[in-house]
Amino acid sequence: MKENNKSVKIKFFKGENIPLELHKTRVVQKLNLVPVERRLQALYEGGFNTFRLTTNDVFLDMLTDSGTNAMSDRQVAAMMYADDAYAGSQSFARLHTAVRDVLKKEYLLPVHQGRAAENILANAYIKKKGDLIPMNYHFTTALAHITQYGGRIVELLYDEAYNISSSHPFKGNMNTEKLERVICETGVENIPFIRLEASTNLIGGQPFSVQNMREVRRIADKYGIRVVLDASLLGENAYLVLKREPEFAGSSMGEVISIMTGLADIVYFSARKLSSSRGGGICTNKLEIYRELEALVPLFEGFLTYGGISVREIEAMAVGMYETLDETMICQSPQFIAYLVNSLANEGVPMVTPPGVLGAHVDAMRFCSHIPQSQYPAGSLAAAFFLVSGVRGMERGSISNQRDEEGNETFADMELLRLAVPRRVFTLSQIKYVIDRLSWLYENRQLISGLRFVYEPPVLRFFMGGLEPVSDWPQKLMKKFREDFGDSL
Ligand SMILES: *Cc1c(COP(=O)(O)O)cnc(C)c1O
């Protein structure tokens, strides 16, 4: 039987242009929507940090797409026939085959999640203090591992990427003129690798084009530097290439994915995103690279045929790897995100455009233009939005930044509230609820004020840090909520 693997466009004779799902729900999880008074209490208990809320208090969990995508029936079924073995598991063999088929890489090193791959790559390749990793943009865990081993990074986006409301289709592109300049100034011997991140997470899930990646490859070859692709969000980047890069208009997901992985020497990924499960991996076609990294897997992760991942999860990863080729599966999240972004933008809410992947991104710098960056507008907005909706988003702004070597605060280029839209998890009425509450909050934005740290961990402070409001603004916001919504939740 032939399967339909292309996203379909259905014309609605009347009404809006809404995304249509090509799946049905078969297992459900009940959600809690607790009263606003309880949500306020939860914020104080969680240090006004959405990472520290518990799901008992959360209605729609839009914190992240990491490990939260819906599993398919086939993935769950595969978990049942997993082969429990420390060494030589058939489950690993099936994953290995899937990686060869989909990512077209011969060698695979399994790791327990994406950052474990970053740890191994930084450990293997950052050999001296000051080694420089050019990249399109950093990801929090990638940066933390590189600096942990004494390395530095330089971010090489085009100026357009920092333009929040833009229509540029590929804001994740690496500025190749700057790349060449950086290589000449720094010296090849001080650049262990170039890192390209698919669907550049922290600037709003924005893709790069294949054309751009080819240009990066050309420069890397000219100077003999390795290209490392962070493929955690590769499926979505490939989907947007199909939709936005004219050369690939008639191509399949598989063709685009294999072209992109073919342009990198090393591909690593978080399977919490790439194949909607747990785990991660590093893969390459070069035996010498495999040999350089091989010993670090048993040291940090586990034996080479499980890498700290349970065999059940490995089976789900293998099935999920093939499902990444299915456009009807990959398109669901980007289509919901586009609907969310466009609807909010129509209400006047400042959003990152064009709509990207993994979530909708609200421009907190404009939403809360009255809050100085030193009082964390994005963190304040995340807390305020949870208070008025029970929806948990994530701060992607200065709280997510790390201090510099002298311990000074470094302000983020963008202050974003990210509302993640994991694959095939939410319904359209839930998305409409988000639009309604966020539009209300926008009208009442003057009631939001800032936050300050009361507990600041030295590494990745955004995860467990504790903050407090600079005034009694949460109480005032709650009062206004009660006035407008009555006794509604
Ligand atoms: C999530 C993510 C990572 C880290 O992966 P984990 O599995 O959470 O450790 C690395 N890079 C990108 C682009 C990501 O989105």
Image (cartoon, rainbow, N blue to C red):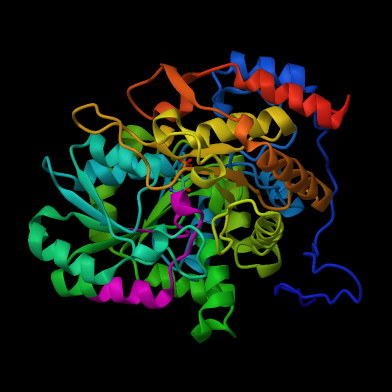
Q: Provide residue 98's location: percent of width, then percent of height.
A: 54, 61
Q: Is residue 457 magenta?
A: no
Quadrant where the N terminus is found in the figure: bottom right
Quadrant where the C terminus is found in the figure: top right
Q: Is residue 215 magenta?
A: yes
**Residue at the image point whose x is 79% and y is 23% from the top:** 34
Q: Nearer the viewer, residue 344 or 400?
A: 344
**Residue at the image point whose x is 57% and y is 73% from the top:** 253
Q: Which residues are magenta?
A: 196-218
Q: Provide residue 377's location: percent of width, then percent of height.
A: 49, 35
Q: Provide residue 486's location: percent of width, then percent of height.
A: 88, 27
Vertical arrangement, residue 10 with respect to residue 389, above or below:
below
**Residue at the image point whose x is 58% and y is 41% from the top:** 64
Vertical arrangement, residue 395 with respect to residue 184, above or below:
above
Q: Nearer the viewer, residue 395 or 134?
A: 395
Q: Is residue 38 visible?
A: yes
Q: Provide residue 452's location: percent of width, then percent of height.
A: 45, 21
Q: Is residue 214 left or right of residue 276?
A: left
Q: Examine the image and state in which quarter residue 284 appears.
A: bottom left
Q: Examine the image and state in which quarter residue 264 appears.
A: bottom left
Q: Is residue 61 left or right of residue 298?
A: right
Vertical arrangement, residue 477 with respect to residue 290, above or below:
above
**Residue at the image point whose x is 25% and y is 29% from the top:** 408
Q: Is residue 91 visible?
A: no
Q: Examine the image and state in which quarter residue 140 appears.
A: top left
